[in-house]
Amino acid sequence: MPPTYTQPIPAAPEPRRKRAGALAAGVVAVSLVAGAGAGVGGAALWTSTHDSGSASATSAEPAVHQGSAPASGSVEDVAAAVLPSVVKIDVSGAQESGSGSGIILSADGEILTNNHVVEVAGSSGSIEVLFNDGSHASARVLGTDPLTDTAVIKAEGVSGLSPATIGQSSQLRVGQQVVAIGSPFGLQSTVTSGIVSALNRPVNVGTDEQGNATTYPAIQTDAAINPGNSGGPLVDMNGDVVGINSSIKTTGSSESESGSIGLGFAIPIDEVMPIIDQMAKGATPTHAKMGVSVTDVTGGSTQLLQEGAQVGSVTEGSAAAEAGLKAGDVITKVGDNQITSADSLVATIRSYRPGDKVKVTWERDGKEQSAEITLDSDATAS
């Protein structure tokens, strides 16, 4: 059996590095039977000790979709409707291989998945897509975006596929039922169900080669998500895709503890649809940014607040600089979103698009200040 992808979420952002036998920063191995390696897998691992380091605030905005309130459909009905739109993805690279999941976007073979699922292929590897009906096809990468951990690939020589219906993650409510579909541990077309446990949970899976944090405001669910589920859909009871299953939290970092404990995380579909559209067209993805580097507020800070994102530096000429933010300020709110940490700020800014206007509130010397800023684009960054 080929390996299945898992991308651990490190305890603090750290540079990605090349390694043999791993698919993303901190990947762990898993196995189905003693002595048989199922490989490294597709739901990221979030260890039980999570400390935030410095991060650079960059972002992307929710897309607008036609959505509806949760229906009373059964899990069986949802599975029957969605399974034809979900694929298994086998990837082989020069030093490693594995499998993950994907979501069919178009009848002619465009498929959405996680960046950490396909990145192992590199420039010389191979990608094969296995469809729910048992057929398969080779695929190529149309675009990848490490900052949102998303990628779009294209299956070759196919037609008449069943595209998934894209829902609206902004309409989700805590407690409503959801279904996860994918290929955990390489077991294709696996269906699990649960509820939305929390919304806007800041999840940090590491950094890209430039040191920018891969952080998103996740949908937390207790639907079982395991290595190999990454890139598969989290759907509501209408069968509409509301998230991309991407990471899990575990009780430890050992290889034997990398399965589901009921703490799974999905990337909200609204946040990444503009990025997905750019990748499908072959364009370079763009993200909003404030122009600050931030850390969590430390215990030794002179600030009265113990929660927030403390500014380490401000880029000259950036939106943050024009708003008057300075090193040492503690950002406490963006729009209506309370900022509790560095990851919280990055995840929140990532829910916007370049050019969006948003009110930012911060604390300086015990006094609250605020300003409306127009978010910059990383398309103009060197």
Image: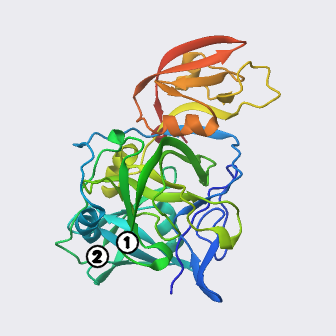
From this viewpoint, is residue 207 visible?
no
Give the class, few, some or many, for how many residues have Cα within 10 Å of label 2's Cα (few <14, many ≥20): some
Mark 2 — residue? 156
Secondary structure under the numbered disc 2 in the rendered image? loop
Q: Residue at x 55, y 24 (%)?
A: 333
The amino acid beneath tag 2 is Glu
Q: Is residue 53 positioned above or below 297 on the image?
A: below
- On residue 140, the disc is 1
Q: Is residue 213 left or right of residue 217?
A: right
Residue 241's x, y, as percent?
31, 54
The amino acid beneath tag 1 is Arg
Q: Residue at x 58, y 68 (%)?
A: 259
Res 169 quadrant in image: top left
Please, which residue is most extreme toward the left here? 160
Q: Is residue 52 positioned above or below 189 on the image?
A: above
Q: Are marks 2 and 1 in contact (CB under 8 Å)?
A: yes
Q: Is residue 261 positioned above or below 84 on the image?
A: above
Q: Is residue 293 positioned above or below 165 on the image?
A: above
- Out of 156 and 203, give the one closest to the viewer: 203
Secondary structure under the numbered disc 1 in the rendered image? strand
